[in-house]
Structure formats: structure tokens, C-alpha cells
Amino acid sequence: MAINHDIDVIDQFECDFCIIGAGSAGSVLADRLSEDGRFRILLLEAGPPDKHPLIHVPAGFLKLQNVAAINWGFRSEPSPELNGRSLDLPQGKLLGGSSSINGTLFVRGHPEEYNRWAQLGCKGWSYDELLPHFRSIERYDGDHSESRGSDGPLPVTALAVRHPLSSAFIESAKSLGFPMLPDINGPRDVGVGWFQQNRRGRFRASTARTFLRRAMGRSNFRLLTHALCTRVVFEHRRAVGVEFLMSDRLFRVRARREVILAAGALKSPQILQLSGVGPADVLSRHGVALVHHAPNVGENLKDHLLVRVAHRAQGSVTLNERARGPRFLREFLEYFFLGRGLLSLGASNAALFARSREDVVAPDLQLSFTPGSYAGLGKLEPAPGMTIGLWQSFPESSGRVSIVSADPNTPPAISLGYLTTQLDRECMVAGIRLARKLFEEHELARHSVFETLPGSAVTGGAELLEYAREYGVSALHFSSTCRMGCDKRSVVDPELQVYGVTALRVVDASILPSASSVNTHAITVAIAEKASSIICAL
């Protein structure tokens, strides 16, 4: 793409805060900071508006991850730990970010993981201190308790339908001694329960359709789409504005108070590095002028390696058959008229939280059940199937994100670094074995014809680990590349200000001090809610 490098200055809207990224965090920030009334807010989004029709159908996530126009299209570097494979890493590039293309599941995580943050010196980030922010974002439609919110912008709702095979999964877990969790987002330890969704009626409730929609009509708020941030502009280590590409032209906007990076755990470190904040050797190699040597920008990348155990199913119609032919027409009509059925469902139905060994403080395995099976990214098998997808909740292994060019249109190098420690390898094997035990319990066993993945011939620990290496995929739960903390490995402080510079914050999943045990959407929204309260209190 040819770029006109003459810089146009946007002066008709001088802002107090310029927010980069209109995803799960940026939409919350835009709403809360503009709601305050004292500030003028500019929100930049590299992608388009959220107009694709499948965005608003919960089950549309299966197809959306392959739509190039609303996806960053990231791909990982070949990984030695995955036998040299590269993985597709779809991330939302549109209003709402990945909250507009994800599986709609809302999961808070275990209280202990947030208490660990506080123990690392992140004052204000314990579970009890985060709980008010979780409550303030939620509009939960279930039984209320002190831990749940009912008046927030983000709908959190029970599944519209409960598939019989998912009920069988829950009964199998109970047969193994796991307690039933009446609310997986309430105080919990080990146990099994039903997922909850970000869904309003029949439609997906992304942060764009909830938080951002509320900001759109305010006179102190402006949104620009198709605006790709090229760098943060500094004067004497103070962030004073942002440069961005729009309509093949380069623009610059000044921010009187702060620039806030909310571009996600893969984009935020890239933008920091392009702006001169990052490892000096990397920046020098690619001709980026150094503003501040920050060697840990892009380091500590955490993600969950997702491994599936699948069975050919019988005795119940699975999602595989319901997604094609005359059955799909019936599903479409049920969804259109009643808001129920296959199209109302998200990425999974139910989850088991378990320990891989007795000396683990918090459950370190999540096993999620889907009454269907996959033939690739976004594709269901034609024959009946059911799947348990599992991951290690707190992986020790980590990767990195690093620029490979000063061109902002060039994707960064993403090294995932899975399974590099013995603990991670042992935990993964334990998870696969637990999934098999669940399938052996009567309630699920009576619906099984045979195991399709990894297959009955794969039995030993070394073989199971090799299966994980060959077939594991990213759970797309990226975090920790701009790690929060008070030590030398940290990029931002507990108020999310970037060390070594001023007037610049990072507010997204990249600030997590360690991996989230679950899907990262809920904690990302809560992070942005807390960050908004910090900023508005200044």
C-alpha cells in the first residue's frame, strides 16, 4: 500500500485521552472516561465497524475467525515444542475487538490467581479489590449474591439451551466426585458447572454493543475506524499524541493528558516497540529510534495450549448434524423465532475445574465440553461427535512478541513457547487422562462409539504428550506481554503506567502479571473498569 507520509494534524478535536484499540478494554475506557464529563476522548480502531451479520449471532464465532476483513490474521512462528508447526491466531480487528468474534463465554477465574497478583506487589489487585469492578460491569440474570452484579452494561446470562450430552458430561464429573457449581463465576474451587454467555436475548453482547454504544452519542467523544496506529509520539519521554494511518494518509493527534494503549496482548507490545519503548537491540535492528530501553516489552507471553479429546457419539443428535441440511433450517427457524437452539450457543457448554495433583493451591486444569467435534478451524465434522477441550490453567512456559520491521503493517513475530517446562508437560498429560476418565463414566460412556482423538492406541505418557505437540492449538488467551508489577520484569506499575515514560498507560490483557486461568475476556473488561476508576480519580 502506498502511503502519503505528509502528516496531517487533527486539530478540530483536541483530546484529553487518546485510546488505541476499540476492543474489550478500549470500549469500556471510552464509555467510562467520556461518561465522567470532564474529558474529551478520541478512540482509534484499526478495523471496521461491527456490521458483519454473523457477529451478532453467538454461534457465528465458528465462521468469523476466518473472515480476513475483521481479523488481524496473526500466525505464530514455527514452534520446536509443537514439532515445528505454526498456528493461526485469529484476533478481532473491528469495533469490540475479539469480544465481537469470540465464543461469547464469560468466566472470571479463580480468586487465588488475583490474590497472587497482590502478593507480587500489585497493590489494589486482589480478588476482594477487583470484585467491585466485576460486579459493576455485569448485568447478571441468575440468582444474585454478594459476588454478582445486576446493573452493569454487560449482560451475563445462562445458556438458552442445555444439550443432553453436556448434561451427561456434568453427571460424569459428579460421578468422579467433583461438586456441582451452581455459579461458575461465584466463589469456587474445584467443580463442574454450566458456562455463562455475554448475550442479550438472542444476540451477542460485545463490548461494542454494550459499553461503546453508550459513548457514541456524547459530544465529548469521537471514534475513528480504519485508523491504524503507527506509533505513540513522545516529547522528552512524555507521551503527547499518536500517529495513525487512515485512508492512506498519516495523521497526528495530540493528547493533553494521556495516551492509553488498549490494543491487546499481541498489538500493544508491537505498538510500544514501534514507538521506541522496548528492547534496545530489537529497536536498533529495525531502525526505530529509542525512547526508553524496556527489555521486557513483548516478553512473558502467556497462552493456553488447547488439546482436544473427542469421541464419535450416539444416542443424541450432536451439533455436527444440526449444523447442516434440513436440521440446520430447523435450527435457523428456532433461533429466528425463539432465540434458542444451536445458533444461540457459544464455544462450549460446561466446564470442569480440577487439580492435576493434590499439592496445587488453585485448580490448574480446565476441561470444557462441547456436544460436537471439529474438522479444523471453524468447521464441524459431518459425523456425530463430542469433545472435551482442555488446558493447563497456569502454564509456566512463556513466549514473546517482537517487531520484525518498522512498518506498522507488518505483523510481529509471535513465539508461543508452549510446553517448555516439565511441570507443564506433566500437567497436560494429566489433563488428557482426566478427560478420558470422564468419557469412561457411564453417563458419557453410553453415548460413545469410540475415541477419535487421540485414539485408543495412544496410551503412554510420552505418546499423549506427543499428541499434544502434534494436535494442540492456541486457546487464544494471550496475556502478560506488558506485565504489571514492581520488579525488573515489569512493564507497567500497579496503576498501569508504563515505566520509564510518562502520560502513557497500557490497559488490556497484556498487563496480567501471570496467565489467567480461564478465558481472558471477563478479566480484560474488569481491568478496564478498574483503570477507568483510577484515571477518573486523578
Image (cartoon, rainbow, N blue to C red):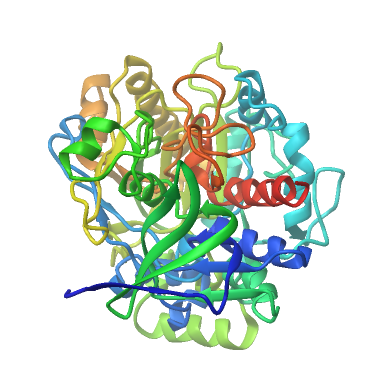
Residue situated furthest left in the rendering: 84
Between 323 and 106, which is closer to the camera in this rendering? 106
Residue 291 spot, x, y in % from top left: 36, 39
Between 384 and 298, which is closer to the camera in this rendering? 298
Residue situated furthest top in the rendering: 359
Quarter of the image for the N terminus: give it: bottom left
Residue 165 spot, x, y in % from top left: 52, 54
Between 59 and 263, which is closer to the camera in this rendering? 263
Count of numbered labels shown in the rendering:
0
Residue shown at the point (28%, 71%) measured from the top left: 68
Is 168 rendered above or below residue 79? below
Between 535 and 351, which is closer to the camera in this rendering? 535
Q: In which quarter of the image is residue 14?
A: bottom right
Q: Is residue 324 left or right of residue 39?
A: left
Residue 10 seen = yes
Residue 59 spot, x, y in % from top left: 47, 69
Is 69 rendered above or below residue 389? below
Residue 155 seen = no
Residue shown at the point (76%, 41%) measured from the top left: 131
Is 430 rendered above or below residue 249? above
Residue shown at the point (36%, 51%) measured from the top left: 271
Residue shown at the point (39%, 63%) measured from the top left: 243
Q: In this view, does 260 lie to the left or right of 28?
A: left
Q: Is residue 278 left or right of residue 512?
A: left
Residue 116 spot, x, y in % from top left: 62, 23
